[in-house]
Structures are given as structure tokens and as C-alpha cells.
Amino acid sequence: MKPLYLIFLYLLILGCERQQPKKCLNVAYPDYWGDELVPSLQHTVVGDAVLTNQFESLTYYTHGGQVVPLIAKSWSISENFKKFTFKINTNKSFSDGTPVTSFQIKKIWEYGLALEPKSSNSSLADVLNNVIGFEEFKNKKKLKGLKTPDAETLIVEYKKPFRTGLTNLSQTRMSIYKIKNGEYLGTGPYKLIYNKNKKAKFIRNKFNTDTIGFDTVCLSVLDVKDVQSKIETGKVDIFYFGEQTKTKCEDSNTIGCVRD
């Protein structure tokens, strides 16, 4: 299980002693996450925080510096650090119930690599430019160094030793997804069902088995100067990146701060 989801990074939260259970956990951010949430084009901190609830990558890089399995259940690395072989957890499913395969991973990475970046650091090229065949990708639209001998096996071959390969493949922009009827579907604990006018709504992804506390999460943008009043009145439950506010959690009986 990926340990960091929507509500566990930097936040301020109203004490949970509520008389009635909430229908929607109200989470606010200091900036807008963007109209189109596509992992391949991730380029902001807020966008990354929102995307990580819907999409998962092959591996996860913990804050303790350890790389752990996510969509890949295991891997092996050649002695020269040029060849990475991943065994894919095909028991993982997208939010429409279809299983993840190595074929889909290769397909979506090549799709994402062909997209026009939104900024200088928002493209899969930051990682995939090291893969064999990158120079020919513009014409061929295929990466020779991505191989899928079967549905459970993904091989990534680099042009030269890439010792940080596992860490790079854990980035949000390297997350796995599929496109269905114009929707971007992931394997994470939530499914995005609305994103408009700087508001968004997530519902639980019934095909994800991770334990999460809320079935529905509502997102909004909130000016940092309004954080304390909105939380104390219960209009906002969580403010992401709470270190940007001047709220002193230690002096409050109703607001708590959590850092990771």
C-alpha cells in the first residue's frame, strides 16, 4: 500500500469529534491543481498531491529512502544497471475493473511521451530519454528499450547504467493509467468524478483494496488567510500544505497539525 494519500502530508485538521458523520471530507489546497489531471503532464506540487490519490506508479519511494513495490510486485536489476525487469501485479485493477498489464504500461508511457509538456519538467522524457530507442521515438512512436514478453513482465533497458532507475520510476508522472471514453482511470484508492471551477470530487475506487477512511472527498481552493476560520467553523476539514499558514496548532484546542 502506498502510505501517503490525500490527507497525510502537511495539513491542518479540525478535531474529529463530530456529532454527525460527514458525507464528504472537505479538503482545501492553497493553489489550483489544474483542469486536466494527467500523470504524464504533472508539473506542480499541488497537482502531484491530488494525482497521487488516483494513480499509482511501479514503485514507491518512501520518505525513509526505501523503494517499495506498488504496481510492480518485484523486480531484478542487471549487474551493470542497464536492464530492469519488473513483475507486474496483475491483480491490481483500474477503476473500471480491468487488470493492469505490462502491455498497458508500455502503451501509456509511449502515449505520455508523445504529449506536449506543460512545463520544462512535466514530461516522461525526464526519465525515458535514457531508454534505448529514445532518439527514434519521434518518428517511430515506440521505445525499443521497453519490452513486454508477457502480461506480467515489463523490461526497461537503458543506454547506460541508471542506478537511480527505481527512484525515477516511482515519480507521479510515471504512474500507470488507461483512457476510457475520455477519462483517465487509475489504480489508486480514489476515482475522480468531477473537476471544474476549481472544485473536484473523488469517490472510493471499489477495485482498490487499500484501507481508506472516507468514501467521498471534496476538493477546493482556499486562500491561506481564510484557513483558520474555515476550519474552526467546519467548512473545511483539512488544509493541505498547512505550513503556509500562520496557525499555531499548539495553542488551539480544535486544530491539529500533522507533518510527515
Image (spheres, rainbow, N blue to C red):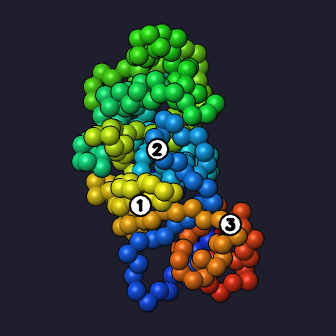
The percent coordinates of residue 90 (x first, y second) are 29, 40
Residue 67 visible in the picture:
no
Pick the front one: 80 or 136: 136
Secondary structure of residue under mark 3? helix
| Mark 2 or mark 1: whose residue is earlier in sequence | 2
The residue under the point 72% across, 80% down is 250
Query: Would residue 147 appear left or right of 125 to someone viewing this image?
Result: left
Instruction: Identify residue type, mark 1.
Output: Lys
The residue under the point 61% across, 56% down is 31
Pick the front one: 6 or 195: 195
For mark 2, what is the residue?
Answer: 36
The percent coordinates of residue 10 (x first, y second) are 63, 62
Cβ–Cβ under 8 Å for marks 2 and 3: no
Image mark for residue 201: 1
User: Would you identify the image quadrant in which residue 233 lies?
Assistant: bottom right
Q: Residues within 10 Å of mark 3 (few under 14, many from 20)?
A: some
Marks 3/1: CA distance? 21 Å
For mark 3, what is the residue?
Answer: 224
Query: Would residue 34 appear left or right of 65 to someone viewing this image?
Result: left
